[in-house]
Amino acid sequence: MPIGLNKYPRNFDIRVKSNRKRQDFVFAKLPGDKSISQRAIVLNAIAEGRGVVRNILRSADTWSCIRALRLLGVKLVWDGEDLWIDGVGLTGLRPPGGKLDIGNTATSARLLMSLLAGSAFSAELSGNRLLSKRPMDWVVKPLMEMGAEIKYLEREGTLPIKITGTYPLRAIEVDATVPSAQEKSAVLFAGLFADGTTQYRQQCQSRDHTERLMRYFGIDIVTNGQVTSITGGRPFAGKEVQVPGDISSAAYLLTAYAIRRNEEKGDLKINDVGANPTRLGYVNVLRERGVHVTLENCRMLASNEPVADICCRPGPLPAAGQTEGVELIQSLIDEVPLLAAISAFASGVSIIKDCGDLKDKDTNRLDTTAKALVQFGVDAASDRDQIKVVGAGSGPLQPAVVDSCGDHRIAMMAAVLASSLEAPSVIRNCGCISVSYPSFLKDLSQFADIEILV
Ligand code: S3P
C-alpha cells in the first residue's frame, strides 16, 4: 500500500528502513498542536456565538472530541482545515441522549468532564480500552467538591462514569495532586461554570495553553507564581484561533534527522511549530547534548502562543546525559520515548528521572519505551520512575520487530529508530498513529523507505 495517503486501514504493521538519500529535509507545514486544538474546540463550544479554529489537528483524538460535542448539541462544521463552531454558551449544552464515547483522548475526556459537571443534566462518559485504564480520580475529586455528582460505572477511579452536573458550580481552591496540565485544565474549565473565583495551585509549571487561550478569549484569569485564579459565571464570545504546528510531532522528525549519519543529510527545517516555553524541553535538552538545533523566525500568534521554525544542521551525535526535575520532564513529557531513543546513539549512560507519570499514559510508557529499545539491541531498562539507557556510541543498533502495544508515541519512536538502519525493521500495530499525527508516515518517508503491511 502506498505511503502518501493520510488514510490507512484501522490497524496495520509497517516495514521501515533508511532510504540513505542525501537531501535537505523541509517540512512546510505540520498538523496542528493536539493540546491547543482540543482546548480551542472546547472553549469555542461553550462561548457565545461563532468561533473558528484554523490548522486544527485532524486526528482520531480531535474527531472524538468533536463527535462528543455534537452529541451535546454544539454545531461544528468543517471548512477545509478550519472548524467553525457555533458556541452554545455556558448553559447551552443539551443532554446527549446516549453514552458519550471519547475514544482514546484523555485530554478531551478530562475537559468534557468539567463541561458536564457544570451542566444541569446527567450523562455517561466512556473511553476505549486504553483510556479506560487511565486514572480519572484526580479530576473527579475536585469536580465533586464543586458540586457535581459522579459515579464510577465499572471500576473505581476510571471511565466509564456517570456525571450529574449542576449550574453554577461552587468555586473552590485546589492544590495539585499530580504535575499534570490536564488536572489544571480540568479545574480551570470547571471554574468557568462556578459562581466566584476558583484557584488552582500547580506543583510545577506545566503546559499553559489553557491559561493563554482563556486570556485571549477575554476570560477573567490571572496567574501569580504557581497559582491561577479564574472567575466564572461570565459569558465570553467565540474567537478565531490559529493552531501552531505540534512540537511533539516535530520532535519525531528532528530525532530522525539527528540520528542520521552526516554524509546522508543536508539541513532540516520545520516551519510554523509551536514554541511555547512550557513545551521546549526536548529542543533544549538536544541543544545541551550538542545537537545543532535552533528556533528561527520566532513570532507570537494573536492567541498568545509563540511560533517558530525549527532548524537543524549536521553535527555530532547527541552526548549522553542525565535529565531530571519534574518541571523539565513536564516540558518534554511526550518526548521521553524519543529522548530515550536518541540516548541509544550517545557514548555512555543516560538516565531520564522523575517520569513516573508516564506509567499512566496510553500504555505504561516507561516500560514500553525500554522494551522497544531492547528490541533494537539497546541496553535499556525502566525502574520505578526512571529510564536508563546505555548508549552504544556510533555502534549500530540491530533491526527489530517492535509491538507498539497500541501506543502512538511508541509506534512513531520505533519507526524513527528504524529509519536510521539499513536493514528493515517491522513495527506492529501502527493504526494508533492516527491518534496524534495521521501524516507521520508520509513525513517520515523523507528519511525512510516504508511499506505498509496489511
Ligand atoms: C496534555 C498534557 C500532558 C500530555 C498529553 C496532553 C494536555 O499530559 O502528556 O499528551 O493536553 O494537557 P499530562 O499533563 O497529564 O502529563
Image: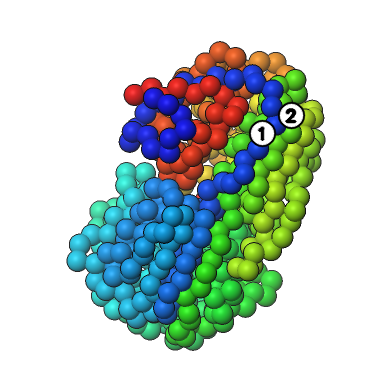
The furthest residue to the left = 97
Where does residue 208 sit, x and y in percent of width and height? Answer: 60, 63
The amino acid type found where label 2 is placed reads: Gly
Percent position of residue 358, x then y:
52, 44
**Considering the image in quadrants, where does the N terminus appear?**
top left
Q: Quadrant of the C terminus?
A: top left
Q: Secondary structure at mark 1?
A: strand
Q: Residue 25's mark?
A: 1
In this orientation, which residue lies closer to the viewer: 372 or 381? 372
Toward which corner of the image does residue 100 lie, by quadrant?
A: bottom left
Vertical relation: 309 (above or below) 15: below
Apparent side of residue 403 relative to residue 103 in the rendered image (left or right)? right
| Pointer 2 with pointer 1, Cβ within 8 A | yes
Q: How is the image coloured?
A: rainbow
Instruction: Place residue 290 in its image quadrant.
Output: top right
- As drawn, 330 above or below 385: below
Q: Where is residue 359 shown, x and y percent of the image?
A: 49, 43
| Quadrant in which residue 209 is drawn | bottom right
Whether 38 is drawn above or below 346: the answer is below
Residue named by callout 2: 266
Residue type at tag 1: Phe
- Which residue is pictured at 33% across the width and 69% down the height? 74
* Residue 278 versus residue 85 in the image, above or below: above
| Mark positioned earlier in the residue sequence (2 or 1) | 1
> Residue most toward the front?
80
